[in-house]
Amino acid sequence: MRNIAIFASGTGTNARKIIEFFRNDDTARVALVVSNKKDACVLDIAREHGIAALTVDRTTFFQSEALLERLRAQKIDFIVLAGFLWLIPPYLVNAFPRRMINIHPALLPAYGGKGMYGMHVHEAVKAAGDAETGITIHYVNEHYDEGDFVFQTRCPVHQDDTPADIARSVQRLEHLYFPQIIAKLVSELPTGPAI
Ligand code: GRF
Protein backbone atom coordinates (compact mmCIF):
# COMPACT_ATOMS: atom_id res chain seq x y z
CA MET A 1 0.00 0.00 0.00
CA ARG A 2 1.49 3.37 -1.02
CA ASN A 3 0.85 6.39 1.18
CA ILE A 4 -0.13 9.78 -0.18
CA ALA A 5 0.07 13.08 1.71
CA ILE A 6 -2.10 15.99 0.58
CA PHE A 7 -0.95 19.54 1.33
CA ALA A 8 -3.78 22.07 1.14
CA SER A 9 -4.58 25.51 2.50
CA GLY A 10 -8.19 25.99 1.59
CA THR A 11 -11.60 24.50 1.11
CA GLY A 12 -10.22 21.18 -0.04
CA THR A 13 -12.70 20.17 -2.71
CA ASN A 14 -9.87 18.47 -4.60
CA ALA A 15 -8.59 16.85 -1.42
CA ARG A 16 -12.05 15.40 -0.82
CA LYS A 17 -12.22 13.94 -4.34
CA ILE A 18 -8.76 12.43 -3.96
CA ILE A 19 -9.55 10.96 -0.52
CA GLU A 20 -12.79 9.46 -1.81
CA PHE A 21 -11.12 8.10 -4.95
CA PHE A 22 -8.51 6.20 -2.94
CA ARG A 23 -10.89 4.96 -0.27
CA ASN A 24 -11.75 1.99 -2.46
CA ASP A 25 -8.27 1.44 -3.83
CA ASP A 26 -6.08 -1.28 -2.38
CA THR A 27 -2.81 0.03 -3.83
CA ALA A 28 -2.72 3.54 -2.34
CA ARG A 29 -4.45 5.66 0.25
CA VAL A 30 -4.36 9.20 1.60
CA ALA A 31 -2.49 8.79 4.88
CA LEU A 32 -1.88 12.40 5.89
CA VAL A 33 -3.30 15.87 5.26
CA VAL A 34 -1.05 18.85 5.94
CA SER A 35 -2.30 22.42 6.10
CA ASN A 36 -0.73 25.76 6.92
CA LYS A 37 -4.06 27.07 8.25
CA LYS A 38 -5.51 25.85 11.53
CA ASP A 39 -9.09 26.48 10.43
CA ALA A 40 -8.81 25.11 6.87
CA CYS A 41 -11.87 23.08 5.85
CA VAL A 42 -9.54 20.45 4.47
CA LEU A 43 -8.61 19.48 8.05
CA ASP A 44 -12.27 18.75 8.81
CA ILE A 45 -12.48 16.60 5.69
CA ALA A 46 -9.45 14.62 6.87
CA ARG A 47 -10.94 14.09 10.35
CA GLU A 48 -14.26 13.08 8.82
CA HIS A 49 -12.42 10.27 6.99
CA GLY A 50 -10.22 9.30 9.93
CA ILE A 51 -7.07 10.54 8.19
CA ALA A 52 -4.19 12.00 10.20
CA ALA A 53 -4.16 15.80 9.90
CA LEU A 54 -1.38 18.20 10.70
CA THR A 55 -1.03 21.99 10.79
CA VAL A 56 2.38 23.47 10.12
CA ASP A 57 3.47 26.96 11.07
CA ARG A 58 5.73 29.11 8.95
CA THR A 59 8.84 28.72 11.14
CA THR A 60 8.61 24.94 11.32
CA PHE A 61 7.96 24.68 7.59
CA PHE A 62 10.65 27.02 6.32
CA GLN A 63 13.29 26.97 9.05
CA SER A 64 13.39 23.35 10.15
CA GLU A 65 13.11 19.95 8.57
CA ALA A 66 10.75 18.64 11.25
CA LEU A 67 8.06 17.91 8.68
CA LEU A 68 10.34 15.31 7.06
CA GLU A 69 10.27 13.29 10.27
CA ARG A 70 6.50 13.23 10.21
CA LEU A 71 6.42 12.26 6.53
CA ARG A 72 8.94 9.49 7.22
CA ALA A 73 6.94 8.27 10.22
CA GLN A 74 3.79 8.03 8.09
CA LYS A 75 5.81 6.31 5.31
CA ILE A 76 4.70 8.90 2.76
CA ASP A 77 5.56 7.87 -0.80
CA PHE A 78 4.01 10.75 -2.72
CA ILE A 79 2.93 14.34 -2.00
CA VAL A 80 0.03 16.09 -3.68
CA LEU A 81 -0.35 19.86 -3.46
CA ALA A 82 -4.03 20.72 -3.81
CA GLY A 83 -4.34 24.43 -3.22
CA PHE A 84 -1.29 24.78 -0.97
CA LEU A 85 -0.12 28.36 -1.22
CA TRP A 86 3.38 28.34 0.29
CA LEU A 87 6.46 27.81 -1.83
CA ILE A 88 7.97 24.37 -1.17
CA PRO A 89 11.42 24.72 0.44
CA PRO A 90 14.47 22.90 -1.02
CA TYR A 91 14.71 20.26 1.74
CA LEU A 92 11.25 19.03 0.81
CA VAL A 93 11.70 19.26 -2.96
CA ASN A 94 14.93 17.26 -2.66
CA ALA A 95 13.39 14.60 -0.43
CA PHE A 96 10.58 13.89 -2.93
CA PRO A 97 12.09 14.09 -6.42
CA ARG A 98 9.37 13.29 -9.01
CA ARG A 99 7.23 12.35 -6.03
CA MET A 100 5.45 15.67 -5.53
CA ILE A 101 2.90 17.25 -7.86
CA ASN A 102 0.77 20.36 -7.93
CA ILE A 103 -2.40 21.24 -9.80
CA HIS A 104 -2.78 24.68 -11.33
CA PRO A 105 -6.13 26.01 -12.59
CA ALA A 106 -4.86 27.28 -15.97
CA LEU A 107 -2.76 26.25 -18.93
CA LEU A 108 0.75 26.90 -17.67
CA PRO A 109 3.08 28.57 -18.44
CA ALA A 110 0.27 31.13 -18.87
CA TYR A 111 -1.22 32.57 -15.70
CA GLY A 112 1.29 31.01 -13.30
CA GLY A 113 3.68 32.29 -10.64
CA LYS A 114 3.36 34.00 -7.28
CA GLY A 115 -0.04 35.57 -6.70
CA MET A 116 -1.66 33.59 -9.52
CA TYR A 117 -4.11 31.46 -7.61
CA GLY A 118 -7.85 31.09 -7.19
CA MET A 119 -10.04 33.70 -8.83
CA HIS A 120 -7.00 35.82 -9.78
CA VAL A 121 -6.27 33.23 -12.45
CA HIS A 122 -9.79 33.12 -13.87
CA GLU A 123 -10.11 36.91 -13.82
CA ALA A 124 -6.88 37.17 -15.81
CA VAL A 125 -8.13 34.60 -18.35
CA LYS A 126 -11.36 36.58 -18.72
CA ALA A 127 -9.54 39.92 -19.05
CA ALA A 128 -7.31 38.49 -21.78
CA GLY A 129 -10.37 37.29 -23.72
CA ASP A 130 -8.94 33.76 -24.11
CA ALA A 131 -11.15 31.25 -25.91
CA GLU A 132 -9.96 28.38 -23.73
CA THR A 133 -8.41 27.56 -20.39
CA GLY A 134 -7.78 24.36 -18.48
CA ILE A 135 -5.67 22.64 -15.87
CA THR A 136 -2.01 21.77 -15.54
CA ILE A 137 -0.65 19.05 -13.29
CA HIS A 138 3.11 19.32 -12.84
CA TYR A 139 5.99 18.12 -10.71
CA VAL A 140 7.02 20.55 -7.99
CA ASN A 141 10.36 22.32 -7.91
CA GLU A 142 11.59 25.32 -5.94
CA HIS A 143 9.73 27.86 -8.07
CA TYR A 144 6.01 28.50 -8.24
CA ASP A 145 4.33 26.59 -11.08
CA GLU A 146 7.54 25.73 -12.95
CA GLY A 147 8.14 21.98 -12.63
CA ASP A 148 7.86 19.58 -15.56
CA PHE A 149 4.34 19.05 -16.82
CA VAL A 150 2.61 15.74 -16.19
CA PHE A 151 -0.78 16.50 -17.72
CA GLN A 152 -2.83 19.29 -19.29
CA THR A 153 -6.38 19.39 -20.50
CA ARG A 154 -8.54 22.21 -21.82
CA CYS A 155 -12.06 23.58 -21.69
CA PRO A 156 -13.69 26.35 -23.69
CA VAL A 157 -14.25 29.86 -22.34
CA HIS A 158 -17.48 31.26 -23.77
CA GLN A 159 -17.77 34.95 -24.49
CA ASP A 160 -20.36 35.58 -21.80
CA ASP A 161 -18.64 33.42 -19.15
CA THR A 162 -17.88 35.25 -15.91
CA PRO A 163 -14.71 34.40 -13.93
CA ALA A 164 -16.97 32.34 -11.63
CA ASP A 165 -18.26 30.36 -14.65
CA ILE A 166 -14.68 29.75 -15.76
CA ALA A 167 -13.78 28.61 -12.24
CA ARG A 168 -16.62 26.08 -12.31
CA SER A 169 -15.51 24.62 -15.66
CA VAL A 170 -11.93 24.35 -14.47
CA GLN A 171 -12.93 22.78 -11.17
CA ARG A 172 -14.91 20.14 -13.04
CA LEU A 173 -11.72 19.17 -14.89
CA GLU A 174 -9.71 19.14 -11.66
CA HIS A 175 -12.11 16.85 -9.86
CA LEU A 176 -12.32 14.49 -12.81
CA TYR A 177 -8.64 14.18 -13.71
CA PHE A 178 -6.55 14.89 -10.62
CA PRO A 179 -7.31 11.60 -8.75
CA GLN A 180 -6.73 9.55 -11.91
CA ILE A 181 -3.40 11.18 -12.66
CA ILE A 182 -2.27 10.70 -9.04
CA ALA A 183 -3.23 7.01 -9.24
CA LYS A 184 -1.22 6.57 -12.43
CA LEU A 185 1.89 8.29 -11.05
CA VAL A 186 1.73 6.42 -7.74
CA SER A 187 1.37 3.09 -9.57
CA GLU A 188 4.58 3.90 -11.47
CA LEU A 189 6.67 4.79 -8.40
CA PRO A 190 9.82 2.79 -7.79
CA THR A 191 9.48 0.37 -4.89
CA GLY A 192 10.92 1.44 -1.56
CA PRO A 193 10.26 4.50 0.56
CA ALA A 194 10.79 8.06 -0.64
CA ILE A 195 12.76 9.01 2.46
C1 GRF B 1 -7.57 24.50 -7.19
O1 GRF B 1 -8.17 25.34 -8.11
C2 GRF B 1 -6.18 24.18 -7.62
O2 GRF B 1 -6.00 24.24 -8.98
C3 GRF B 1 -5.37 25.24 -6.96
O3 GRF B 1 -6.01 25.48 -5.74
C4 GRF B 1 -7.38 25.19 -5.85
C5 GRF B 1 -7.77 24.33 -4.69
O4 GRF B 1 -9.15 24.24 -4.60
N1 GRF B 1 -3.98 24.86 -6.88
P1 GRF B 1 -9.85 23.34 -3.53
O5 GRF B 1 -9.42 23.83 -2.15
O6 GRF B 1 -9.42 21.93 -3.77
O7 GRF B 1 -11.29 23.53 -3.76
Image (spheres, rainbow, N blue to C red):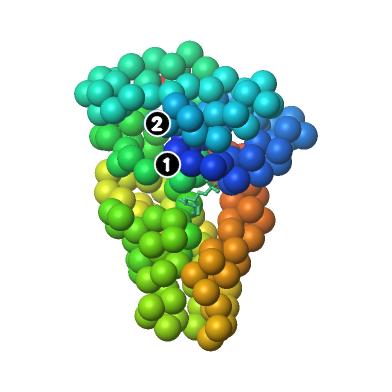
Task: Look at mark 1 in the image and give the residue it sits on.
Answer: 84
Describe residue 104's horizontal placement relative to residue 113 as left or right: right
For the point 48% across and 30% down, the residue is 39
**Relative horizontal placement of residue 70, taking residue 112 as reference (left or right):** right
Compared with residue 70, is residue 125 higher up or lower down, i.e. above or below?
below
Count of number-bearing discs: 2
Residue 52 percent across, percent down from the top left: 57, 20
* Image location (x, y in percent) of residue 10: 48, 41
Q: Quadrant of the C terminus?
A: top left
Q: Label 2 is placed on what type of residue? A: Asn
**Residue occupying the point 42% across, 41% down:** 84
Dot 2: what SS?
A: loop
Q: Which residue is mark 2?
A: 36
Image x and y of residue 17, in percent = 66, 44
Count residues near mark 1 (Cα–Cα under 10 Å), then give few for <14, some for 14-19, many for 20+: many
Q: Give whichever of discs 2 and 1 has the lower sequence position.
A: 2
| 83, above or below 75, in the image | below
> Can residue 139 be seen?
yes
Q: Quadrant of residue 149?
A: bottom left
Q: Tell me which amino acid carries mark 1.
A: Phe
Using residue 146 as the reference point, say whether residue 118 is left or right of it.
right
Residue drawn at x 73%, y 33% is 23
Of helix, strand and loop, which one carries label 1? loop
Looking at the picture, tell me which residue is in the foreground, 84 or 161: 161
The quarter holding residue 183 reads: top right
Q: Quadrant of residue 16?
A: top right
- Disc 2 + disc 1, Cβ < 8 Å: yes
